[in-house]
Image (spheres, rainbow, N blue to C red):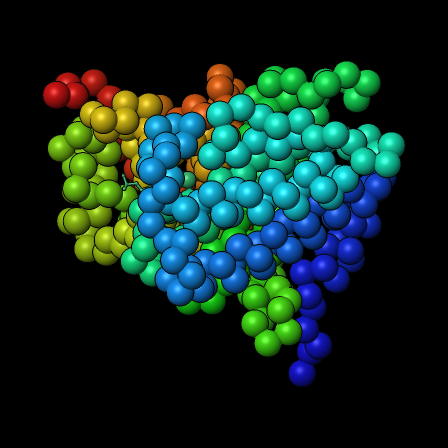
């Protein structure tokens, strides 16, 4: 039997893939792995310690904030702020970005963006939720302060991205632009162990995934694709946690869509915190990620930290089919 490879070992082994790597990126990934274990522990016992439920405030995008969101946000901030490997962070739960004082003369080049607990409507019913993160290298000169523009880079500039899925088991999946690898948390030893090396998304899958309840509010091309799925007997799977829905799509093949709706005319999901990291991962696994405007998600220039974007992401055959039908129906009136 092969010996297990832990996340830390894997990260260290991979450091040599980056010719002038200083170890900062590896350090950051390890810090995120530790924060994920702490959050996982709390997610697992949330019902017991009464930190479940809404805390009454709203996040930067005006949605209810579940208390576990606050806990996860605080832990991610805490680990990243004290790691010394990170110059600034931005969170879906924070209005603006946060500069980090440099520790012991270290001048970090990296920024981390994250959605600390995605799928918060699922928290209090024991359904899978996740943490999403991405790492960028700053663009501004390292002599000056980090600027907003450092965070508003296209997704194609991501240095690394990943997610943690708190599901029937806990998994951490990440990419540094050289393929995608998945690690499952072994609760016995408290380590993420390599379980899904070199993930490749199937060319097509058996499921499409979106909120079918908004059907009437989708544009004609999206409706045409949904009719196509129905006519050829493609099954519907929708958890309502992007991490879980995209994870299934990545492993089993399929397509995930969050198009514009009447109440979310730009789409609901955040470009910086959700669409870009997931698009980087799926592309690295051989999939495709586009907007309903048929542009590549990773080529969209963010205009704000909390900007929303439409997304169609998944197996190449299925995304291409959806894109074809959107194109064909582009002139059909949208009522
Ligand atoms: P959140 O970041 O507030 O949890 O919202 C994002 C979530 C995604 O995980 C999921 O894909 C989507 O919202 C579900 O939205 P809807 O309930 O409109 O289907
Ligand atoms: Mg989210």
Q: Position of residue 43 (x, y in %)?
A: 45, 58
Figure check: 220 above or below 231: above
Q: Nearer the viewer, residue 278 or 191?
A: 191
Quadrant of the rendered image containing residue 3? bottom right
Q: Position of residue 250 (x, y in %)?
A: 45, 53
Quadrant for the N terminus in the image: bottom right
Q: Report whether residue 79 is seen.
A: yes
Figure check: 312 above or below 45: above
Q: Nearer the viewer, residue 14 or 150?
A: 150
Q: Position of residue 232 (x, y in %)?
A: 19, 52
Q: Report whether residue 242 is seen.
A: no
Quadrant for the C terminus in the image: top left
Write down which quadrant ligand 1 falls in: top left
Q: Position of residue 277 (x, y in %)?
A: 52, 39
Q: Residue at x 13, y 33 (%)?
A: 216
Q: Residue furthest bottom?
A: 1
Q: Residue at x 68, y 38 (%)?
A: 81
Q: Residue at x 82, y 30 (%)?
A: 107
Quadrant of the rendered image containing residue 158? top right
Figure check: 205 above or below 295: below
Q: Nearer the viewer, residue 246 or 124?
A: 124
Q: Is residue 307 left or right of residue 199?
A: left
Q: Residue at x 37, y 62 (%)?
A: 47
Figure check: 63 above or below 163: above
Quadrant of the rendered image containing residue 251? bottom left
Q: How many marks?
A: 0
Q: Is residue 158 left or right of residue 118?
A: right
């Amino acid at each position: 039997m092969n010996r297990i490879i832990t996340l830390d070992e894997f990260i260290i082994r991979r450091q040599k893939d980056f010719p002038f790597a200083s170890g900062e990126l590896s350090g950051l990934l390890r810090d995120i792995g530790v924060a994920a274990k702490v959050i996982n522990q709390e997610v697992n016992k949330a019902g017991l310690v009464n930190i479940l439920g809404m805390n009454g405030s709203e996040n930067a995008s005006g949605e209810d904030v579940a208390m576990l969101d606050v806990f996860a946000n605080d832990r991610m901030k805490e680990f990243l702020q004290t790691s010394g490997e990170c110059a600034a962070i931005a969170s879906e739960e924070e209005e603006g970005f946060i500069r980090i004082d440099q520790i012991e003369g270290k001048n970090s080049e990296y920024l981390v963006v994250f959605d600390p607990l995605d799928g918060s409507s699922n928290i209090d019913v024991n359904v899978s939720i996740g943490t999403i993160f991405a790492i960028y290298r700053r663009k501004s000169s390292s002599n000056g302060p980090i600027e907003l523009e450092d965070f508003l880079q296209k997704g194609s500039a991501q240095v690394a991205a990943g997610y943690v899925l708190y599901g029937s088991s806990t998994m951490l999946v990440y990419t540094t632009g050289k393929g995608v690898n998945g690690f499952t948390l072994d609760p016995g030893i408290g380590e993420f162990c390599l379980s899904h090396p070199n993930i490749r998304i199937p060319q097509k899958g058996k499921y499409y995934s979106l909120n079918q309840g908004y059907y009437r509010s989708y544009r004609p091309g999206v409706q045409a694709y949904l009719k196509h799925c129905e006519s050829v007997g493609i099954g519907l799977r929708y958890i309502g946690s992007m991490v879980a829905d995209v994870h299934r799509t990545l492993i089993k093949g399929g397509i995930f869509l969050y198009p514009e709706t009447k109440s979310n005319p730009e789409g609901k999901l955040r470009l910086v915190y959700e669409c870009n990291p997931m698009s980087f991962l799926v592309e690295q696994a051989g999939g495709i990620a586009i907007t309903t405007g048929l542009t590549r998600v990773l080529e969209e220039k963010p205009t704000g930290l909390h900007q929303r974007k439409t997304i169609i992401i998944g197996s190449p055959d299925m995304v291409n089919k959806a894109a074809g039908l959107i194109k064909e129906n582009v002139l059909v009136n949208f009522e």
